[in-house]
Amino acid sequence: GENVEQHPSTLSVQEGDSAVIKCTYSDSASNYFPWYKQELGKRPQLIIDIRSNVGEKKDQRIAVTLNKTAKHFSLHITETQPEDSAVYFCAASKDYQKVTFGTGTKLQVIP
Amino acid sequence: DTGVSQDPRHKITKRGQNVTFRCDPISEHNRLYWYRQTLGQGPEFLTYFQNEAQLEKSRLLSDRFSAERPKGSFSTLEIQRTEQGDSAMYLCASSLAPQETQYFGPGTRLLVL
């Protein structure tokens, strides 16, 4: 089955700096890669996603890149703000079936 | 609120008891997923339905776990003879195939004493 690895497990940045979270996946058939943000005690919320026919996608301060050959994908958050502090999960899926999540990155943005 | 809802939000039970959780997906969503999340980990897939058909079950889902979606709308997840290791957050998500985006409910936090 699919295996998703995520690094780093914790990340502290100063407000205004950029944050990068990296993930790798094992199943070359995976074709959908969502990123979820989960605040303490709350549900995971989709923040951005990318499909395997696209190499990069951007939404305001958030961007995701995908390298299918290397089976890597990354989340980039620019101009970080304290409200970006949360746990971020990368994930992979094939043909809108089950989603396999990474182990999460706890992002702390220091004011 | 037209999002995914789950009931109860919290459940405390004694080891050996049975528990049942309910999930109401977003209206018209034909796919419904159950995940389990333990502290410090990402959600782990348990099972999913398309309409009333259960299409896949994880090997993590022991025979003490059963899920149903009898009319293709809400779903129930039952755990029989609960064990302390079942303590976790149980998350439900729904989607409208062929769109991939899964929307999560608030979860049911289970504590087995």
Image (cartoon, coloured by chain):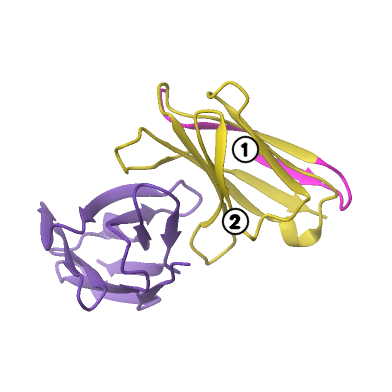
Chain colours: A purple, B yellow
Position of residue A74 measured from the top left corner of the image (x, y, whole percent): 23, 69
Amino acid beneath label 2: Ser
The 10 Å Cα crowd at callout 2, few under 14, some 14 to 19, many 20 or more, is: few
Residue depicted at x 71% and y 56%? B87
Position of residue B93 measured from the top left corner of the image (x, y, whole percent): 47, 40
Instruction: Give the total number of marks visible in the rendering.
Output: 2
Residue depicted at x 31% and y 73%? A23
Left or right position of B76 against A2: right
Quadrant of the frame with the C terminus of chain B: bottom right
Disc on the earlier residue, 2 or 1: 1
Check residue B8 for magenta coloring.
yes
Can you tell which quarter of the image residue A69 is in?
Answer: bottom left
Can you tell which quarter of the image residue A2 is in?
Answer: bottom left
Which residue position is annotated with label 1?
B9
Left or right position of B34 against B15: left
Which chain's residue wears label 2?
B
Mark 2 and mark 1: span between their CA atoms? 23 Å
The 10 Å Cα crowd at callout 1, few under 14, some 14 to 19, many 20 or more, is: some
Q: Secondary structure at mark 1?
A: loop
- Relative to B108, residue A104 above or below: below
- Relative to A32, residue A28 above or below: below
Instruction: Let me know if marks 2 and 1 both belong to one chain.
Output: yes
Quadrant of the frame with the N terminus of chain B: top left
Position of residue B47 measured from the top left corner of the image (x, y, whole percent): 57, 47
Left or right position of A19 against B101: left
Which chain's residue wears label 1?
B
Amino acid beneath label 1: Arg
Residue depicted at x 45% and y 69%? A103
Residue range in magenta is B1-18
Q: Which mark is residue B58?
A: 2
Q: Secondary structure at mark 2?
A: loop
Residue depicted at x 42% and y 67%? A102
